Amino acid sequence: MDLQKIIRPNIWKMAPYSSARDEFKDAVGDFVFLDANENPFDNSLNRYPDPMQTQLKVVLSKLKGVETNQILVGNGSDEVLDLLFRAVCEPNVDNVLTIAPSYGMYSVLANLNAVENRLQLLDADFQPKVEEILSKVDARTKMIFLCSPNNPTGNDIIPEKIVQLLENFDGFVVIDEAYIEFSNQNSWIEVLNDYPNLVVTQTLSKAVGLAGLRVGLLYANKDFVGILNKIKPPYNVNVLSQAKAVEILKDYDKVAAATALIVEEKKKMNEALKEISFIQKIYPSAANFILIEVDDANSRYEQVLAAGFVLRNRTKDPLCKNCLRISVGTPSENEALLNLLKTL
Ligand SMILES: *Cc1c(COP(=O)(O)O)cnc(C)c1O
């Protein structure tokens, strides 16, 4: 893959902002910091954060089996996805392709960056139609976005289909793995070194339980990650977020136990939902939510809301007519919801 060909010319040539902490990296030793115009009085947050999130990347590197220079950390997945657009898509010239139904942010970011989004409907099993996708892309298509497990449908994308896209498309294949911890599939991070055009995004917002922290992650080949690091806002992940992320990830057994409990709960809910008469279909889910098809999504949504439960109404999404998406809650929340559904 010729990186210079896919990166926007202005980005390729751009010199990054050099922050005080970029110019002084020597972390060992006892120094007096008079280089960044900070307030010198210690209140635990008076210093700028590490722009390269070094400690967090060391923890992630061990956890994920990648080099630290293959990791980009952002202020949520939203930021890392936006950086992708800004790095490779020339506004009003380049385009991307996304699948539908899928996560809404891809279209929003395409729009925001004045980039055409070519939508490709999934098939009846919510799998990508590889041949149609490949016939829709052209020399100006810079990225194909996939999401596995997919939101809002919940299914894994069949690995062979992803390989076909990786092997037959010149631009980046971006796989959003926001829900990968709940799935039995392996992460695509494991084959990062085999595909220079593979980009994987993950998040601490779902299984790791830190949605309020805003930490999104991107894994790709180190040269591309170097370019993304060059264009990101220098202090994009704050001191508290970096520290809390390190603390929670160091105790990953706890995260894994919570993930296992959520998966167990999902299985129980799946069985119980089969007994509810107005539910017409329960889609198989590899994530921490279940997509169901009901008789009338709008009225069921309102009925459940009146009883104090907020579901996600996906009836307007393509292929999702009369579908509601239910996140798996705590055991008692799930039980309460199921008890309510039985009475409707
Ligand atoms: C929830 C979710 C994310 C997470 O976004 P953050 O900005 O990291 O909180 C990313 N992708 C998908 C598909 C999601 O459903």
Image (cartoon, rainbow, N blue to C red):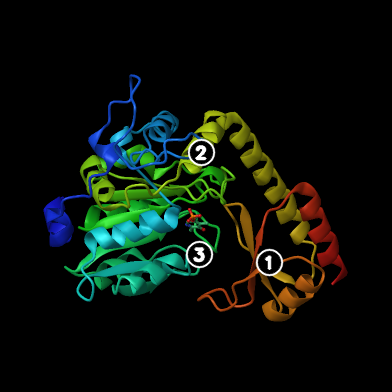
Q: CA separation, marks 1 and 2?
A: 28 Å
Q: CA distance from mark 2 to mark 3?
A: 36 Å
Q: Residue 25 placed where, x, y %?
A: 27, 31
Q: Amino acid at mark 1?
A: Leu
- Residue, disc 2: 245
Q: Give the residue type at disc 3.
A: Asp
Position of 29 compared to 291: left or right? left
> Which residue is rendered at x = 30% and y = 57% of the image?
84
Badge 3 element = loop
Q: Quadrant of the C terminus?
A: bottom right
Tell which of 302 and 40 is nearer to you.
40
Looking at marks 3 and 1 on the same chain, the residue that comes earlier in the sequence is marked by 3
Closer to the eye: label 2 or 3: 2
- The disc label shown at residue 125, or none: 3
Q: Are marks 2 and 3 in contact (CB under 8 Å)?
A: no
Dot 3: within a 10 Å radius of its alpha carbon, few (fewer than 14), some, or many (20 or more) residues?
few
Q: Can residue 149 be seen at all in this image of the molecule?
A: yes
The answer to whether one can see residue 161 in this image is: no
Which residue is located at x 71 percent, y 78 percent? 295
- Residue 279 screen position, x and y as percent: 73, 69
Q: Quadrant of residue 256?
A: top right
Q: In this view of the protein, which residue sits in the foreground, 237 or 222?
A: 237
The amino acid pointed to by label 2 is Ala
The disc at residue 311 is 1
Q: Is mark 1 within 8 Å of ligand 1?
A: no
Image quadrant assignment for residue 131: bottom left
Q: Position of residue 266 (x, y in %)?
A: 68, 50
Disc 1 on helix, strand or loop? loop
